Image (cartoon, coloured by chain):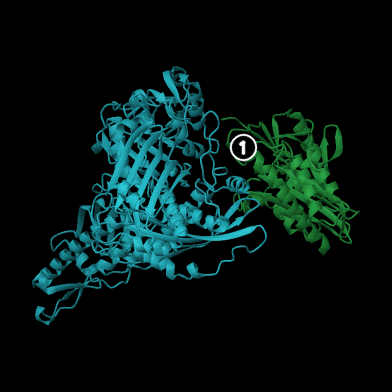
Chain colours: A green, B cyan
């Protein structure tokens, strides 16, 4: 039996120090809903596990001075659901995070883990990208920020440098008339992995789209920001032609593979269908805000 | 005696296994541990098809902590030229299935096994075993396996004089098929495929065995038949049955697939070699890759009818995937597909096709759902073409009592029409269904029926009166679907005591007489029959004891409400003697009270089911959801109604999975690509509506309580019922399962 070292630092500096010192032999443990499964399957064999749930900055939700939100990377989905204001501002991000796994899993699983797992099918990632969330990371060389879409590098890989830990997500303030939504296609009704995941965030003014961001998952090696789809919506009243143009942009952005979860043709088609459906929900929410 | 009140029969009494299961105390096969126990692990073939040139186990044996290694050399070999049958299993194939001999026939086929001090050391030892493979081209799908030039799995198999992957055929016929089609006003012929599906039991295969120094073996394992475990282990290890005690653990689902062994003989040989108890537990990956599944199928069904809907001819060609070794359940589609109908001209042919996948195992009404998918889809198409109500057409063509069944006997009762009528009269069938409730959403309704043989067979039971006047019943059947609860109800009723005073347990091979497998919808039928006979004998004994005490004739005594009473005024006046009082006096009046009864039971009439389903299709995404499902079945008598309903609901849910989402997927190298519950998509709770069972009770006149079988018939109609409903919704008929979103989407795109 291989020994595994378990550390539960109280500060971020300690965690970063230990992570960097382990030089690749350590894994970060937040909810553990990916890591522990990988260890059981023999896929991950870390020498050290660094549990970040004892670090306050990683486990709290704050409203920023500008009116946005800062979510600790290890905050589990159920805690986010209990927050009085977050779900009102970002219903799409919240529903995406709480589509991950079962109720039991949602009690542990965090958006930070979902992002760092590097799966193109991670549910929270397209919604975070659509939201324009910015990730704060800290490593041996200090702190830096990057947009969520800059983090994934490929299936199971990220652009974090050795020793870097995701600290938090910062979501911008919401202007009036904003709404977001996340839909995914899964063959079952739950307990499944996205065949396509779609996050849309809109800001409307007098029925006209002022801002639009589209995050698209499970159709390429990484989750994508589909800027063409957002552009196709801005300045429109979400007429059929605008939605079709945005859907076409999503289809064009797909670089899927044929695998056990879906065919290339099916994924491309579904990306377009989900864009229209997700945008409709986001617009309805925007209208109510 | 059979004129019963129903104080307990037909009541939803507390399950004998309930408290243990909900509190986590139930002992499943993997829960057992023993002092000095070793962990066994199976090394499996990394190739779908390969000759095994040699196996070198020396490095594994030299690894510290390794206590034994076994390969096919240690398993009793059954030569290829001589069949040795145990039930429906041919030991030639079983000996090669538990351990690859000449060839590895599928990815995951066992090639060696190790016993070591821990799972980790066992895994390391497996990695040190050197197997020299000559990799051969593989073949998975039926279409490919029966093509000219296909890789041939077994040189000894010949079909029509040539080497072939068709290992056997089965033909049933009636009348003159050509004449029948010539008489028909309408003939429809269609070709169907279904994918292999796994039984999906939650509990992986597991066993603990101990081979003692005196050559006696104890096996704790989860199976649908401890006597099957004993007999197969005996045949495959050469140890006499009298020296093997197979103790059945609580079972976490079997659905037919635990009617054969995988691990037990291997663990026994590891224990024999090491002198230590050995435990082996499969992973889910191993279960999906190397156990079970039901076969995939390729079927062509042709049915001819008169304009009024009278069926005149039916022809079926059913190719089933056997897996790497022969033995697919041809009897299911060949015998059941047309059995419920009075069709004068029938030709039904099955083909057993070997290919490089794990050997199939029984799965609920083996083979019958496949055939019903094809036959009941074609019937739907004929009814539609003729403008007939599909239920009316089925009623018109139902077999009649006394008709000769295509599979041999003459029918006794035929209660098919009653199941059709139950659906026809149910509010579901006449409920309005909005076909196009929202843009992009379509709904449809479908019906289909199903037939299963049901079965009797060997069953043993002991009914013993305890010294304190309660009852212990020992049966020989693992309880997979409520047999303990059902037998407790029967015994409480017949002895006339409170249900809580009856304790039903499952005996092991050395404590109860031979009892055949739990399967084929036979166990509640058979064990209620022997339990009734045993209770009758116990009551006779009790009356004899009362007669001795009262010094009157036993004939003058009646047994009522758990007490002996004088039968009438002429018998004399005595205060009643209760079971407790008689038990207390048992030894002075001739000894302990009890009975063991063993019978080869007969008289299980077939089961019929008719189902109605509403579906909703998300047209743009190709997603089919089941909105409402009603399932009618004649069960004879529901001894424990909640269990009967559960059996019907469970069969339907498995059928929904089969129709919509479950399938084995293979990669280019012939490896299963979805060997997990994540990507092998069985329905989850939220995928299915509440299934409404209509439990029809027309007593089987050949059974003391009127029992028919229950467990198989409900999985027969769903595939066709759902396909018929999807057709009603979309106007597009699906001939290939599962109707998964990518397939439905592609089909709708092609249809424009």
Residue at 46% across / 55% down in the picture? Answer: B381
Residue on which the image places disc 1: A259
Q: Is residue A183 above or below residue B627?
A: above
| Image-based side of A214 in relation to B567, left or right | right
Most foreground residue, B346 or B285: B346
| Image-based side of B382 in relation to B467, left or right | right
Element class at badge 1: loop
Report the chain holding disc 1: A
Hey, which residue is sitting farthest right in the picture? A66
Q: Is residue A221 above or below residue B615?
A: above
Q: Is residue A99 above or below residue B398?
A: above
How many marks the image carries: the answer is 1
Most foreground residue, B443 or B453: B443
| Image-based side of A26 in relation to B212, left or right | right
Q: Is residue A225 above or below residue B62?
A: below
**The N terminus of chain B appears in which quarter of the rendering?**
bottom left
Classify mark 1: residues with Cα within 10 Å, few (<14), some (14-19) or many (20+): few
Residue at 85% across / 39% down in the picture? Answer: A146
Q: Quadrant of residue B582?
A: bottom left
Residue B463 appearing in the image: no
Q: Quadrant of residue B53?
A: top left
Residue B129 on image: x %, y %: 47, 21
Residue B557 appearing in the image: yes
Residue B723 on image: x %, y %: 50, 53
Residue A110 on image: x %, y %: 71, 47
Most foreground residue, B698 or B601: B698
Residue A211 on image: x %, y %: 87, 52
């Amino acid at each position: 039996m291989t020994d595994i070292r378990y550390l539960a630092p109280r500060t971020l500096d300690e965690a970063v120090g230990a992570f960097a010192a382990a030089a690749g032999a350590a894994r970060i443990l937040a909810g553990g809903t990916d890591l522990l499964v990988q260890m059981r399957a023999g896929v991950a064999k870390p020498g050290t596990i660094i549990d970040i749930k004892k670090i306050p900055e990683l486990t709290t939700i704050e409203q920023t001075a500008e009116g946005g939100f800062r979510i600790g990377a290890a905050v589990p989905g159920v805690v986010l659901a209990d927050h009085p204001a977050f779900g009102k501002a970002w219903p799409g991000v919240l529903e995406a995070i709480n589509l991950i796994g079962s109720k039991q899993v949602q009690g542990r699983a965090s958006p930070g883990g979902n992002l760092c797992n590097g799966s193109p099918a991670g549910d929270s990632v397209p919604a975070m990208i659509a939201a324009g969330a910015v990730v704060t990371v800290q490593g041996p060389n200090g702190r830096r920020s990057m947009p969520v879409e800059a983090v994934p590098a490929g299936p199971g890989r990220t652009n974090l440098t050795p020793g870097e830990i995701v600290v938090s997500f910062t979501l911008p303030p919401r202007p009036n008339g904003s709404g977001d939504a996340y839909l995914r296609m899964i063959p079952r009704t739950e307990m499944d992995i996205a065949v396509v995941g779609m996050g849309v965030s809109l800001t409307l003014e007098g029925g006209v789209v002022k801002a639009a961001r589209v995050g698209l998952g499970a159709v390429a090696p990484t989750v994508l920001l589909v800027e063409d789809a957002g552009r196709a919506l801005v300045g429109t009243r979400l007429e059929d032609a605008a939605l079709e143009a945005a859907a076409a942009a999503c289809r064009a952005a797909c670089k899927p593979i044929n695998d056990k979860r879906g065919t290339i043709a099916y994924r491309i088609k579904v990306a377009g269908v989900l864009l229209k459906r997700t945008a409709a929900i986001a617009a309805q929410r925007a209208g109510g805000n | 005696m059979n004129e019963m009140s129903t104080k307990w029969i037909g009541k939803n009494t507390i399950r004998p296994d309930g408290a243990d299961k909900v509190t986590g105390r139930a002992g499943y096969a993997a829960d057992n541990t023993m002092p000095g126990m070793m962990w066994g692990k199976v090394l499996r073939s990394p190739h779908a098809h390969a000759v095994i040139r040699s196996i070198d186990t020396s490095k594994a044996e030299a690894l510290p902590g390794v206590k034994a290694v076994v390969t096919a050399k240690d398993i009793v070999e059954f030569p290829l030229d001589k069949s040795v049958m145990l039930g429906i299993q041919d030991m030639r194939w079983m000996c090669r299935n538990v351990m690859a001999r000449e060839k590895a026939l599928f990815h995951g086929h066992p090639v060696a096994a190790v016993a070591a001090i821990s799972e980790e050391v066992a895994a390391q030892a497996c990695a040190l075993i050197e197997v020299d493979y000559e990799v051969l081209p593989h073949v998975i799908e039926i279409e490919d396996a029966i093509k000219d030039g296909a890789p041939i799995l077994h040189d000894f198999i010949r079909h029509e004089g040539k080497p072939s992957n068709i290992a056997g055929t089965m033909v049933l016929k009636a009348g003159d098929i050509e004449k029948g089609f010539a008489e028909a006003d309408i003939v429809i012929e269609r070709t169907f495929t279904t994918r292999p599906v796994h039984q999906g039991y939650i509990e992986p295969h597991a066993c603990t065995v101990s081979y003692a120094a005196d050559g006696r073996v104890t096996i704790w394992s989860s199976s649908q038949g401890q006597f099957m475990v004993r007999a197969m282990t005996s045949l495959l290890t050469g140890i006499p049955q009298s020296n093997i005690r197979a103790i059945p653990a609580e079972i976490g689902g079997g659905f037919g697939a635990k009617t054969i062994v995988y691990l037990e003989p291997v663990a026994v040989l590891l224990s024999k070699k090491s002198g230590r108890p050995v435990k082996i537990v499969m992973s889910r990956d191993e279960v999906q890759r190397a156990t079970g599944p039901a076969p995939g199928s390729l079927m062509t069904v042709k049915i001819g009818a008169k304009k009024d809907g009278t069926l005149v001819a039916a022809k079926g060609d059913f190719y089933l995937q056997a897996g790497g070794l022969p033995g697919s359940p041809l009897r299911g589609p060949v015998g059941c597909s047309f059995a419920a109908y009075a069709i004068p001209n029938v030709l039904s042919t099955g083909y057993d096709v070997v290919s490089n996948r794990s050997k199939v195992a029984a799965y609920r009404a083996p083979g019958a759902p496949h055939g019903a998918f094809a036959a009941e889809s074609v019937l739907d198409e004929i009814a539609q073409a003729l403008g007939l109500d599909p239920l009316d057409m089925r009623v018109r063509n139902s077999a009649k009592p006394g008709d000769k069944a295509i599979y041999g006997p003459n029918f006794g009762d035929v209660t098919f029409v009653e199941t059709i009528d139950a659906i026809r009269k149910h509010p579901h069938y006449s409920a309005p269904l909005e076909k196009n409730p929202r843009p992009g959403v379509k709904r449809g309704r479908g019906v289909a029926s199903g037939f299963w043989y049901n079965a009797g067979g060997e069953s043993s039971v002991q009914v013993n009166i305890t010294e304190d006047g309660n009852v212990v019943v020992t049966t020989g059947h693992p309880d997979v679907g409520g047999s303990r609860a059902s037998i407790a109800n029967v015994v409480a009723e017949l002895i006339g005591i409170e249900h809580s005073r009856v304790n039903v347990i499952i005996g092991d091979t050395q404590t109860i007489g031979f009892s055949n497998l739990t399967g084929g919808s036979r166990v509640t039928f058979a064990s209620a029959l022997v339990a009734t006979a045993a209770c009758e004998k116990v009551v006779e004994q009790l009356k004899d004891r009362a007669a001795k005490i009262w010094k009157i004739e036993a004939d003058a005594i009646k047994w009522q409400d758990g007490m002996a009473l004088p039968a009438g005024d002429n018998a004399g006046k005595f205060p009643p003697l209760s079971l407790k009082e008689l038990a207390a006096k048992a030894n002075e009046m001739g000894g302990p009270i009890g009975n063991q009864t063993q019978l080869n039971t007969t008289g299980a009439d077939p089961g019929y089911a008719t189902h109605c389903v509403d579906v909703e299709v998300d047209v743009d995404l190709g997603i089919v959801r089941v909105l409402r499902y009603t399932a009618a079945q004649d069960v004879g008598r529901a001894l424990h109604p909640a269990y009967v309903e559960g059996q019907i609901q469970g069969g339907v849910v498995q059928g929904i999975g089969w129709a919509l989402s479950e399938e084995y997927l293979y990669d280019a190298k012939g490896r299963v690509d979805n060997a997990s519950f994540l990507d092998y998509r069985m329905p989850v709770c939220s995928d299915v509506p509440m299934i409404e069972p209509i439990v029809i009770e027309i007593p089987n006149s050949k059974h003391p309580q009127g029992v028919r079988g229950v467990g198989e018939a409900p999985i027969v109609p769903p595939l066709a019922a759902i396909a018929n409903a999807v057709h009603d919704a979309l106007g597009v008929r699906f001939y290939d399962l599962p109707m998964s979103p990518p397939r439905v989407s592609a089909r709708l795109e092609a249809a424009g």
